[in-house]
Image (tube, rainbow, N blue to C red):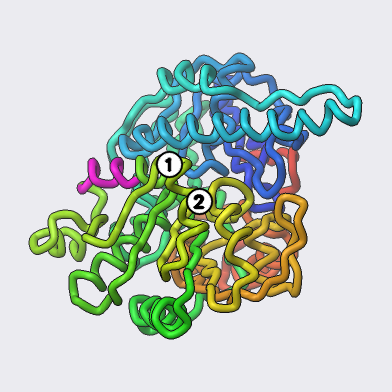
Amino acid sequence: MHVQFCGAARTVTGSCHLIEFDNGFRLLLDCGLFQGRQAYVDTWNQTFPFDPSTIDAVILSHAHIDHCGRLPKLVKDGFNGPIYCTPATADLCQIMLLDTAHIQEKDAEYHNKKREQRGEPPLEPLYTPDDVPPMLALLKAIAYEQPFAVTDGVTARLLDAGHILGSASVNLRVQQNDKDVRIGFTGDIGRPSRPILKDPVRMDDCDYVLTESTYGNRYHEGTPDDQLRLLQIVKETCVKRQGKIVIPAFSLGRTQEIVYMLDQLSHQGKLPKLKVYVDSPLSTNATDVYRLHPECYDQDIADYIRTDPNPFGFNDLTYIQNVEDSKRLNFDPQPCIIISASGMAEAGRVVHHILNNVENPNNTILIVGYAAEGSLGKRLTQRPEFVKIFGEEKKVNARIEIMDSFSAHADKGEILAFLNPLDKKRLRKVFLVHGDYEDAQLPLQKTLTELGFANVEIPAFNTTATLD
């Protein structure tokens, strides 16, 4: 058996790993988009380091775009096998991938106007909305903990990873040619004791594990009360300074968590009287999917629903779909909270909100999650004096607040707590993926080795490792 690291290798996005079994069957774990740059001009997104028509099946860990975003292109380029995932992930993929296709079309149209002026040939989007339905038809929903056959001699189980709705770790058992080998893929590891979702479930013991390492060398801030910190920022900005709070938030996961927290504050009578807007059609649709899958909720929100049947809505909350309503927010002088996608602020309506609000010292830009290098979100976390948005240089007068306690990714301690229960005597090799090489992976490699994990490797892009 071999595993080929086709994405998220010494970088964070583009999760994609190809396992070829002894019988020739080729299984892809994830097929994500490389983010932090224009998707359709990125050669890593434009081409696969394998022939898609030779892939027999895909197992998808979850519906974040850096894990599922190239699936329509995979099908467009020749793949026609099953795509296994949880029911919630299947539902989320329908809205996530159609949205991504629309964004790519619009971005390509915008940039091709400039290319035409320069006499350059046009660029095609990776895929269009017409390419998404054929891919959705291949989705096969599998419940958590239900074993299923991938091919002769290979079975799999999906266990709750606690990262976003429907997220899973992949646990493979391979019984071929007198071998009995277990392979684990963490997907993205979630965090215990976070709102809405259940805690991550322990993986099966395995011989080989591919683990994410996004925050492999840092701990999330130890805020004793996220609600209290958020409330302080709201009072300081919207009440004291009469300003606006702009929150770039991933449509899937982060938005629902922030809305749920504001819903609780409103329900408790603590939230000041002001308008809260979720300005993202995708976020609105994703929230509807969250409502459809209460089986993924933890006990706290299950109990909360008994007194508040709608944990993602309150009187002063408005979900915005129409683009004209979105534009009007930029001319409304009243204090408010605007939650908008994308989370890295590299595209979407939130970029316009930042453009229109970043120069006002009464306002706050609140960063609540990971932002890849090259994204506007990342540049803002560095609190620069100026920032360029849509070619315009803007002075950063607004306050930049960072709450990485909202992160859905496990920090260093939580990664170690997730991996430590694995039988180290059985575990032959650990592959670190989905992390920055110098900042996260090298320090995590050192720590894991010190803790007794043997053979911790950091594979480079498109390298192959043998799994005996």
Q: For mark 2, what is the residue?
A: 341
Can residue 457 be seen here? The reply is no
- Residue toward you, 449 or 76: 76
- Residue toward you, 349 or 60: 349
Query: Measuring 52% from the left and 59% from the top, which residue is drawn there?
Result: 248
Circles 1 and 2: CB atoms closer than 8 Å: yes
Q: Circle 2 sits in a helix, a strand or a loop, which is it?
A: loop
Which quarter of the picture shows residue 267?
bottom left
Tell me the kind of residue under disc 1. Answer: Leu
Query: Measuring 48% from the left and 29% from the top, which residue is drawn there?
Result: 98
x, y (%) of residue 413?
A: 49, 73
- Residue toward you, 363 or 96: 363
What segment is highlighted magenta in the picture?
A: 287-294
Query: Measuring 61% from the left and 39% from the top, which residue is drawn there?
Result: 33
Query: Measuring 58% from the left and 38% from the top, which residue is drawn there?
Result: 32
Tag shown at residue 270: none
Q: Circle 1 sits in a helix, a strand or a loop, which is it?
A: helix
Residue 250 against residue 136 in the figure, above or below: below
Q: In screen coordinates, is 276 left or right of 455?
A: left
Q: How many marks?
A: 2
Tell me the kind of residue under disc 2. Answer: Ala
Which quarter of the picture shows residue 374?
bottom right
Q: For mark 1, what is the residue?
A: 282
x, y (%) of residue 91?
A: 34, 34
x, y (%) of residue 416?
A: 50, 68
Q: Quadrant of the C terminus?
A: top right
Packing grade of label 1 (10 A; few <14, some 14-19, many >=20) is many
x, y (%) of residue 195?
A: 31, 64
- Residue toward you, 455 or 217: 217
Whether residue 292 appears in magenta in the rendering, the answer is yes
Q: Quadrant of the N terminus?
A: top right
Q: Earlier in the sequence, mark 1 or mark 2?
A: 1
